[in-house]
Image (tube, coloured by chain):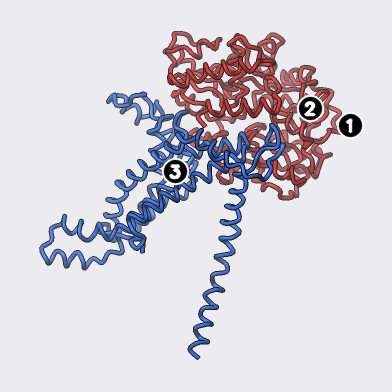
Chain colours: A blue, B red
Amino acid sequence: MAVTTRSKRIKTAYLLLIPGFAWLFFFFFFPLGSLLATSLKRPLGDSPEAGFAYALQFSNYSQAIAEYWPFYVRAFTFAAIATVFCLLLAYPISYYMAFKAKKYKYLMLVLIVAPFFASFLLRTNAWKTILSSEGAVVGFLNFLGVLPQERILSTSFAVILGLIYNFLPFMILPLFISLDKIDKRLLEAAGDLYATGNQRFWKIVWPLSIPGIVSGTILTFIPASGDYINAELLGGISDKMIGNVIQSQFIILRNYPQASALSFTLMAIVLVFLYLYLRKIGTKELL
Amino acid sequence: MAKRKRLEQAPKELLPFLSRRGFLKAAGVTGVAATTVGFSSALAGCSTSSADVVWSNWTAYMDVDDDGNFVTLNKFSEATGLTVEYPEDYSDNDEFWAEVLPLLESGESTGRDIVSPTDWMAARWIKLGYAQELNKANIPNAQNLIPELSNPAFDPGRVYTMPWQSGYGGLGWNKALLQEAIGTSDMTTVDQLFDSRLAGRVVLLSEMRDTMGVVLAWQGADPTNFTSDEFYAAIDFLQSKVDDGHIQNFMGNEYLQPLEQGDLVAVLGWSGDLVQLGEDFGFNLPETRGNLWTDNLLIPVGAANKENAEKLIDWYYQPEIAAELAAWVNYITPVVGAKEAAIEIDPELAENPLIFPTEADLAKTFIFKELTDAEEQEYSSAWQKLLGN
């Protein structure tokens, strides 16, 4: 009796897994395999229209890395800076929302999510107007004389600013959730035991918010390192990230093997980063 | 090649994002649906349309009335009873090509009856056999085509294509800011564009042929027949101007916004764009010549409504219709007799050399060399590197 119930349960579990696995197979493994195969193809002629043949051309990878490694470095640097600033900005906001905002908590949450109702592109483009050299922001900064190039648009600064702006909610939401989950009685108990505010924060709040920090940094860093819109719209010629190279290789030069090799390399590096990061922090923190 | 928009039609803060190529370009790639004004609708790659003819054109390349209706297109529907689907989704030659190529290669219909590639891209469609021969019996007005455009190298005798509009790639500038920077409000040479006093406030076109053509001509090479050494010499020069910060960026239509805002003093830009910006801005062909480009109408293989498409092409070769269109888009019309028809609408319009160029104007232009496949790949790669990609 017990055996049949158990095997039934297992069967149900497997049945429930089917849609998920089917989804993963068709929309993740299959395209990934196709991308990998494309990344090893060789061209059949001078133009992309001549087509590409299946091959094992590993030189696509060495070439891609030899030629474009500075773009990876730039992309990861920009993404890392943006992630750090997102964390610095997001933590106080999330903390306030979780512990202080009380009845305004959900209103704040809505306000943080609200920008998503407008297109990513429109919002990024809006920065072009805000940061215009004739605008108030740049005018004031130039009055103070703090801008080396006397402008913000078409600089690395603008790209990083765009990344921070666009990915900030991805940092705030997981952080808020993990802070909000903290049992407030723990803080009361600590207070009863004469813990100072500082001690309460570093001994209770901070450790318990680490899962939020981990998911927030991952959700921010990964898409930011592959982003190309911010560099395209806000950056200058020497601010292009690896995403811009992949876009131009794919769409303009139609060098599909090169573009695929670049994408695959990007993915591999991100995976290595992720592995090292999680190993250092420990995945149990994510739970 | 170049699109523009009517600035006075919508709040400036909003419309530029909706109509400029930069936005559409990004939108196309990220899969965000680009919505268009009027009765055009978003067109899914290979959907079958219920319209009698489907035409993919660049944005803001059609006369619009205050209510957002496409006037000459509506007249066509009234006159022929044919409905037109007019998605303005031809936002970039390369990107449109990347979108339809898989369909063409697998022998499927692109879902379009007319597409609007620029010369060099039209050449690619024809060379690969993806363009259908036009049946001139359905296009009697084709005889109104101006002789200058009736025999291009990529399509001798206009077997596959008819021109839509032409325009110039040349010098565009903000008059007040130029006066302030170098003491003149007129710009006639490429030397002025590279005047060190404009450092960091100059943007060049991201279309290789437009920028390279102008620079090659300025450096004394012939853009219609240059050598590889000349090409790389021009690239090296531009690279040095990127490195010393003189060139702020390379852009498509997106240069309009910063130019209008006063972030930029001068650009290499498109004639119709600058005309549209109004009196405070200037456009000139450089003394060393500027680029003359043409966007063409072409019927792709697999088009479901070839005959209707030909009727539509014919419609725009009537001088009165061409004049009405030119009055709005400010580009060069390819139709003989449009000038006479334009006098009826507005005599001043007929005098505009950017719409009805004189022999002397055309002598200041060139049509960029046709590149072989190998050259195309090699030069485009070098160009993308210059652009920082």
Question: Contact, CB < 8 Å: mark 2 with mark 1?
Answer: no
Image position, residue A162 (x, y; %): 41, 39
Which quarter of the picture shows residue A143?
Answer: top left
Give the label, 2 or 1, closer to the camera. 1
At horizontal 54% and vertical 12% (from top left) the residue drawn is B190
Q: Is disc 2 placed on a helix, strand or loop?
A: loop
- Residue B136 lies, with reference to residue A184, above or below; the image says above
Residue at the far bottom in the pictured view: A1
Residue found at x 57% / y 26%: B383
Q: Pick the residue in front: B103 or B1.
A: B103
Expressed as whole percent of the image width and height from the top left, the position of residue A208 reads: 27, 61
SS at mark 1? helix
Query: Do tags 3 and 1 sit on the same chain?
Result: no
Which residue matches tag 3? A225
Residue B375 spot, x, y in % from top left: 66, 25
The part of the image, by quadrant, that contains residue B324 is top right
Q: Which residue is mark 2?
A: B317
Q: Secondary structure beneath disc 3?
A: helix
Numbered badge on residue B137 = 1
How far is the residue under mark 3 from the one under mark 1? 56 Å
Task: Give the left or right position of residue A269, taking residue B357 as reference.
Answer: left
